DNA sequence: AAGTGAACCTGAAGGC
DNA sequence: TGCCTTCAGGTTCACT
């Protein structure tokens, strides 16, 4: 589900809960999510103290003392819920509820982290497309999940020249190229649709048609950055029931101009169309996106 | 080699 | 009401 803005929102929500805390106990309710939890997962985390949190693409990285990192991916439906002494605090997509009597017994509560201040942090993931793995902090970028990830779209490395070089000779549709995490990190189906709509570029166009020096490429990158920043400010989107840290609903969904708007009017007078590209829905306006 | 589609898994929503 | 089909924010594997 979550794309870069939602993952960033969850990471920011986890920060005050986890920072400087020690994990005293780890409950694993099953042996795997997308893949098996690594050997020694529980033992490595128990007794470890959190130093910092980071995000890379759609991965949340929790750094501990002694060169240990926990890499988490929320997949499509992963969410964190913190139960503190004062009640339940939801960090991901969920609902807000209070009451210290809440327990971690939902059918898809797969991991429970018990912290040294009594807080329980629950990872819930119905579809189990999420992932958790351990890594060596000092060699984080060499981890198999992270080593081939491309540039962060909100960092300084994302430039038109970089993208043009990656798109050169690419016959894949622009939509597919933008979803490729090896080129730009963190873009997902929604924000790619929205950015292409804002940039008035057809998702079906071959990536290589945007060449070095083409102003439309600068324009597209500007829209990508803008849309991600706006979404982060809004606390992520609310497809279904995404919510920010404090139970406040993310409000970005209301601003979608193309995504999930099949048949509706585009501001240009055309109609939003839904097509399928590499197995995923693309929403765009054939009238103004060229 | 690159590009497309299927697979992974569960739940929600829509059609009949 | 209930059964069946389709679809979902992601990633990765297996084909052509």
Image (cartoon, coloured by chain):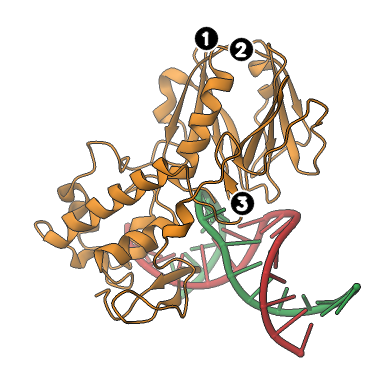
Chain colours: A orange, B red, C green
Circle 2 sits on which residue?
A48
Tell which subunit mark 2 falls on: A
Earlier-in-chain disc, 1 versus 2: 2
Circles 1 and 2 on the same chain: yes
The residue tagged with tag 2: helix, strand or loop?
Answer: loop
Q: CA distance from mark 2 to mark 3?
A: 32 Å
Q: Is residue A278 above or below residue A98?
A: below
- Left or right, A228 with reference to B14: left
- From where the camera sits, is residue A166 visible? no
Tell which subunit mark 3 falls on: A
Q: Residue at x 40, y 41 (%)?
A: A233
* Percent position of residue A145, x then y: 48, 38
Q: Residue at x 25, y 69 (%)?
A: A200
Earlier-in-chain disc, 3 versus 1: 1
Q: Residue at x 80, y 41 (%)?
A: A106
* Percent position of residue A198, x then y: 29, 63
The residue tagged with tag 1: helix, strand or loop?
Answer: loop
Q: Are marks 1 and 2 in contact (CB under 8 Å)?
A: yes
């Amino acid at each position: 589900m979550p794309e870069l803005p939602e993952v960033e929102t969850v990471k920011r929500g986890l920060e005050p809960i986890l920072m400087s805390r020690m994990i005293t106990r780890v409950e694993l309710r099953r042996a795997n999510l997308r893949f098996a939890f690594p050997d020694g997962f529980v033992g490595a985390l128990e007794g470890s103290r959190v130093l910092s949190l980071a995000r890379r693409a759609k991965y949340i990285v929790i750094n501990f003392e002694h060169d240990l990192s926990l890499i988490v991916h929320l997949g499509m439906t992963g969410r964190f819920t913190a139960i503190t002494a004062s009640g339940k605090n939801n960090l991901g997509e969920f609902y807000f509820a209070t009451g210290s009597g809440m327990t971690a017994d939902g059918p898809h509560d797969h991991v429970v982290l018990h912290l040294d201040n009594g807080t329980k942090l629950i990872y819930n993931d119905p579809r189990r497309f999420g992932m958790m793995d351990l890594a060596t902090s000092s060699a984080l970028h060499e981890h198999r999940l992270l080593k081939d990830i491309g540039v962060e779209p909100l960092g300084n490395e994302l430039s038109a020249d970089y993208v043009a070089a990656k798109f050169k000779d690419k016959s894949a549709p622009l939509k597919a190229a933008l979803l490729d995490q090896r080129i730009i990190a963190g873009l997902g189906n929604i924000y790619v649709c929205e950015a292409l709509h804002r940039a008035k570029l057809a998702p079906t166009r071959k990536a290589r048609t945007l060449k070095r020096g083409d102003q439309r490429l600068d324009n597209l990158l500007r829209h990508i950055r803008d849309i991600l920043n706006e979404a982060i400010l809004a606390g992520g989107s609310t497809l279904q029931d995404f919510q920010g840290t404090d139970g406040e609903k993310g409000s970005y969904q209301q601003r979608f101009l193309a995504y999930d708007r099949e048949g509706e009017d585009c501001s240009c007078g055309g109609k939003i169309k839904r097509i399928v590209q590499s197995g995923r829905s693309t929403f765009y306006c054939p009238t103004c996106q060229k």
